[in-house]
Image: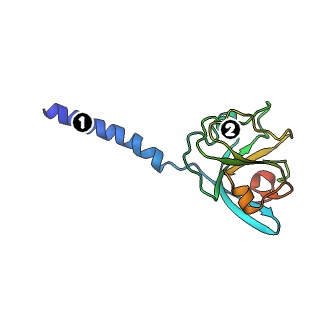
Amino acid sequence: MKKLISLAVLAVAFVSPALVLPALAQTPTEPVSIVSGGKTHAFQVEVADTLPEISKGLSGRTTLGKDQGLLMDFRQVREQYNLNMKGVQVDLDMLFIDGEGMVRAIAVNARPGSLRTIAPGLGSAAVLQIAGGQSQALGLKPGDIVKNKMFGNGG
């Protein structure tokens, strides 16, 4: 009986950190602001700048706050990469951004789980993914400027 209790305590001690760590683990974020129509909209975003990080994207997320997002940096990815919503569980807006930080195109309310390719047909240096409907709610449009250290214009 003593051995059984010891094993149970050891199992709980071993398993509990694994269960708790994902809730405590925080992917580092950095500021992004979007200047649109004389207004500045602030976000805190995670950055994906490797092919594995970009491939994972926001897969598995069940929520995304209105001031959160993911900034995908395609400048170091040497191959053509098509985006889709496989594994994503929330609606997303995708802002396709050139190397200077200018929004070139916006895909609005991309549907969770869709395998449809999402691409504007333009060479994008980056894609900013934000909660679905946010771009319309904030009045974002092509020509707006995204500010972040990635574009050399702040954050």
Residue 146, above or below 126:
below
Mark 2, other Cα within 10 Å: few <14 / some 14–19 / many ≥20: many
Q: Position of residue 73 (x, y in %)?
A: 74, 43
Q: Is residue 131 left or right of residue 104?
A: left
Residue furthest to the bottom in view is 38
User: According to the image, what is the colour scheme of the structure?
Assistant: rainbow
Residue 55, above or below 45:
above
- Dot 2 or dot 1: first in sequence order is 1
Quadrant into which the C terminus falls:
bottom right
Q: CA distance from mark 2 to mark 1?
A: 40 Å
Q: Position of residue 2 (x, y in %)?
A: 14, 34
Identify residue type, mark 2.
Ile
Per the image, label 2 sits on a secondary structure element best described as: helix
Number of labels in the image equals: 2
Q: Is residue 22 left or right of residue 63?
A: left
Per the image, label 1 sits on a secondary structure element best described as: helix
| Residue under pointer 2 | 54
Residue pictured at 59% horizontal, 56% vertical = 65
Comparing 8 with 115, the one in front is 115
Residue pictured at 24% horizontal, 36% vertical = 8
Q: Is residue 89 visible?
A: yes
Tell me which corner region of the image, top left, top right, bottom left or bottom right, holds residue 10: top left
Tell me which corner region of the image, top left, top right, bottom left or bottom right, holds residue 143: bottom right
Residue pictured at 20% horizontal, 36% vertical = 6
Comparing 90 with 146, the one in front is 90
Quadrant into which the N terminus falls:
top left
Residue pictured at 63% horizontal, 58% vertical = 66
| Residue under pointer 1 | 8
Identify residue type, mark 1.
Ala
